[in-house]
Image (cartoon, rainbow, N blue to C red):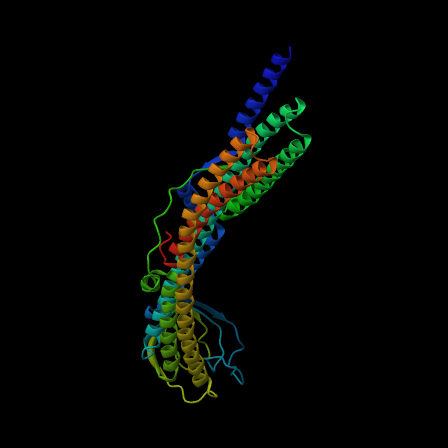
Amino acid sequence: MNRRYLAVLLAAAWAASVWGQNAGTVRLSLADAEAQALKNHPQILAAQNEASALGQEVVQARAPYYPTIAGELTGSGANQDGRIGAGALAASRLFNRYGNGITVSQLISDFGRTPNLVATARNRAGASQQTYQATRFDVLLRVTQAYFDALRAQQTIRVARQTVAARQTVVDQITALANNNLRSQLDVTFVDVNLAQAKLLLIQAQDQQQEAFAELTRALGAQQNANYVLTDEPLPPSPPPDPEALIAQAFNSRPELAGLRLEREAAYRFERAERDLKLPTVSLVAVGGYIPFIEQITLPRVIPNEYGGAAVDVHIPVFNGHLFTARHEEAHYRALEADQKLRDAEQTIARDVRTAWASASTAYQRMDVTAQMFRSATLSEQLAHGRYDLGLASIVELTQAQLNVTQADIENLNAKFDYESHYAALQYTLGLLK
């Protein structure tokens, strides 16, 4: 009866675990996580929209190259024989009329200001594209590191569960021996404490997994958290031997630097455009239309129903309170500011490359040390267990050996995932995380 009841409980637990896995489990590889983040992350979508918006500024800047055409409908009523005494109306005589027509204006030349404004807008649009690319790199780095942190948490849970199972077996064995007066109760208390430590490790690992899953969900740009089942990734190659050779590569590949170079070029082109404010502007204006109704009773002569005319206007700035000079000076200092921002970014990226290379190199060397430590701790635990079974070692030696194995196993895991994260950071600093 007890066996049948136990079998029913095990079957129910297995079915519940399978149902729960199918309902809330998301299987994910690193490539899948990157693709999902690039598709859904709001920062990428916002940067893409910003780049599209700045692309329209190029169209706006090029508008003066084309004529401006406007339709006009005008009707007026006035007292006969009246005259305008004040104001800014174009006609001095007032009379009843209605007319319609079009007005065409075309910039002929502003001596380079419009081409410079177009170049400014085009460079700023190009810089926004580089900002969009840099945002993609930022999101890819965060999702990569979040993926490895979550994978680390899952592997730590595996180690913790194995540790709990192994120490539970030791507790059962020593408890049975103590019940037969072959071991002391002191040994039982030692292994009980050891088992409790393993259970605490499992609880902490489960908490870390939930935190890692929450961060991974945020990095993916997802709304709902999930129980991720992650695929282990192959270990990346060793880092390059010299960081100085990588700096030039980063200068050529980092989108932030490309964007700042375009921003600098835009600043200098805008400075030229502001300088050209002092130059004349030549424009063509043409009008034409038809007046179907005009009151001509008191007029000395008949006004024709059709009208048309054209004029060339040359606008020459003379003095405006030093406005154009101040605008040119401001643009000049903005251009110098762009120079220094680019220089500062280059120095920062050079530092980041050296730092990321040092971290990746250290993590790569650490993997060999932790692997050797884990092998030594495993052998030590096996020897301690054998010595304890033969009565040649104390329970303290055995429990310490078990603790060393657990710590070495976790350190080995941390070294592996630390290197994968640091290598991803190095690829990011080089502009290669795509």
The residue sitting at the right extreme is 185
Q: Residue at x 52, y 83 (%)?
A: 84
Q: Residue at x 45, y 76 (%)?
A: 297
The residue sitting at the top extreme is 1
The image quadrant of residue 239 is: bottom left
Instruction: Tell which of 261 and 166 is nearer to you.
Output: 166
Relative to 57, residue 16 above or below: above
Taking the image as shown, residue 408 lies to the left or right of residue 104, namely right
Residue 414, percent across and down?
A: 48, 46
Relative to 20, residue 419 above or below: below
Residue 83, percent across and down?
A: 51, 83
Relative to 305, residue 372 above or below: above
Instruction: Tell which of 186 and 250 is nearer to you.
Output: 186
Instruction: Tell which of 99 and 123 is nearer to you.
Output: 123
Residue 44, percent across and down?
A: 45, 53
Q: How many marks?
A: 0
Q: Quadrant of the N terminus?
A: top right
Residue 272, percent across and down?
A: 36, 79
Instruction: Tell which of 390 and 303 is nearer to you.
Output: 390
Q: Is residue 22 visible?
A: yes
Q: Residue at x 61, y 26 (%)?
A: 172
Q: Is residue 60 visible?
A: no
The image quadrant of residue 270 is: bottom left
The residue sitting at the front extreme is 392
